[in-house]
Amino acid sequence: MPLMDATQMISKYVTDFGTTIENLSVKILNGYAAKLNEEYTARKNSLCSSSHLFRPRALVATFADGTKVRYPVGERKNLLARAKKLIESKAVCIDYEGEYWPYVPSTLLGVNYRSSAMEGFSSSGKKTVGSFSYTSDILGDIVQTFAFEAVPEDLLKVAIKCMDNVSLSSGFCKGSRSINIKARRFRGKGLVKGNVKRIYTRDIKLSKLDPTSCGKSNAPYYYCLSYIGESIKNVHLLLPTQGGGGARRPGRPALPGA
């Protein structure tokens, strides 16, 4: 098992929900923290730990020898600069993995979860599809698509409220799928009335960077919510040119329209 460096911390980590955590301890593959030294400082003793509550967002860099290193990043506004620095530090591939909460505490949302089973489900499999405006952690404003189970209608209505500029039954900008981005989302689960062994699960995509409002609206319809932050494959191919107008790095093709 690779040796991990547990001597590093992020002085200020801001969660997707807006909570600020000071002196967040992180573990990075031994010998690689220095490649992103702007992000980390020497670890201080901390009385409290949030390591089991959520997994921090991170850039996952692959180097020429195949070594893969996960680099947590404290603030989303720094993701682009940190990705550029890793390219300068000889990373050949970079993926982005957003923040992950296996269980979102109801206190974080300011509302209680559902405690009774829900009815109105069917086995038709019918889905409502469309597109919506989405603010990416890294790429700015883009268009994303969605497909959500049409029944129960209450679940559909509250889920759509989390998306801006929704266009139903539209193939508008479906080509955005080619950039391998998965929008941030909540995953809600609950019990179906009349069948205690049957569970319903819904993925609820959301437009805004702050997921709190969406979570608050949807929590009363589920027994629990997890939160899955945005993820992007091959971020290194989506970075702007170095120096704002210079030549692109070898091996990084220009994007269509660039």
Image: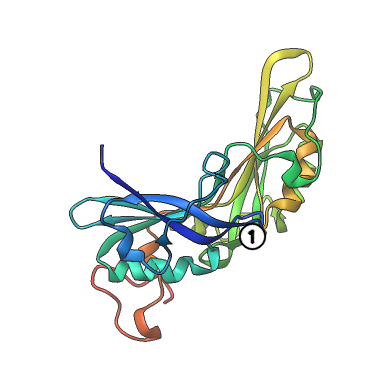
Q: Could you tell me which residue is drawn at 80 percent across and 45 percent down?
A: 110
Asked whether 254 or 249 is in front, the reply is 249
In this rendering, would 43 be left or right of 222? left
Task: In the rendered view, tell whether residue 203 sits above or below residue 207.
Answer: above
Q: Could you tell me which residue is drawn at 56 percent across and 52 percent down?
A: 183
Asked whether 203 or 5 is in front, the reply is 5
Asked whether 222 or 48 is in front, the reply is 48
In this rendering, would 162 be left or right of 61? right
x and y percentages locating residue 3 in the rendered image: 27, 43
x and y percentages locating residue 104 in the rendered image: 66, 40
Q: Could you tell me which residue is drawn at 43 percent across and 71 percent down?
A: 81
Residue carrying label 1: 209
* Amino acid type assigned to the residue bearing label 1 in the image: Leu
Q: Which SS class for mark 1?
A: loop
**Residue 3 in sight in this render:** yes
Q: Could you tell me which residue is drawn at 24 percent across and 66 percent down?
A: 90
x and y percentages locating residue 108 in the rendered image: 72, 46
x and y percentages locating residue 255 in the rendered image: 39, 70
**Residue 159 in sight in this render:** no
Task: In the rendered view, tell whether residue 56 sits above or below residue 219.
Answer: below
In this rendering, would 45 be left or right of 16? left
